[in-house]
Image: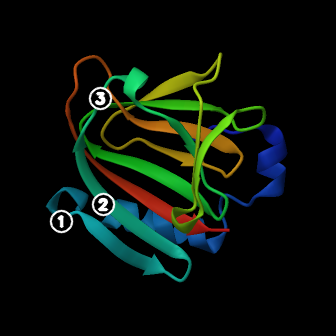
Amino acid sequence: MYATRLTLSEKYNYLEDKFKAAYKWLAETDICALDDGAYPVCEGVTANVQSYTTFPASEGRFETHDEYFDIQYVASGLEQFGLCNREGLVLSEDVPENDVKFYEEPAHSGSILLTPGDFVVVAPEDAHKPRCAAGEPCAVKKVVVKVKI
């Protein structure tokens, strides 16, 4: 799965070498066997393996990053992943040392269901709300691959 606005598909090359290296790493790595932590993929690309329990969407916050794309890949579990356009959102917190900005809940947003083997590519212009439960909270093993712009 891949979803973005046409203007972003013209701005970014989602098949440049860094993205291809990330996709290859995801395809060739037994993620469920890895401990949580950061794994270097190549220059400008790091895979962050995470294990957590999802929570109700009302407890999450939309976020964006200025310096990195996220490739969010679910290895096990289910996650409802919130998405909306960053433009027009109201900033509630900026944590520049972690390259993350958080926003007030927008009036309108969407979401997609990520199941094992699914991933979504999130550009800096895309706000996203990860870790949301798809029904009852469940355990998730996920990789967030950070691709430097």
- Residue 142 picture location, percent across and down: 31, 50
Q: Quadrant of residue 36?
A: bottom left
For disc 2, the neighbor class at 10 Å (few under 14, some 14 to 19, many from 20) is many
- Tell me: residue 59, above or below residue 119: above
For badge 2, the amino acid type reads: Val
Q: Nearer the viewer, residue 130 or 104?
A: 104
Inter-mark Cα distance, 1 to 2: 7 Å
Dot 3 falls on a residue whose secondary structure is loop
Q: Which mark is residue 55?
A: 3
Q: Do the residues labelled 1 and 2 touch (CB within 8 Å)?
A: yes
Give the residue at mark 1: 35
- Residue 55 picture location, percent across and down: 29, 29
Please report whichever mark, 1 or 2, sits nearer to the chain's N-terminal start: 1
Relative placement, left or right, of 147 versus 116 is: right
What residue appears at the point 78 percent right and 47 percent down from the top-left corner? 8
Relative placement, left or right, of 100 versus 113 is: right
Q: Residue 49 carries which label?
A: 2
Q: Quadrant of residue 130?
A: top left
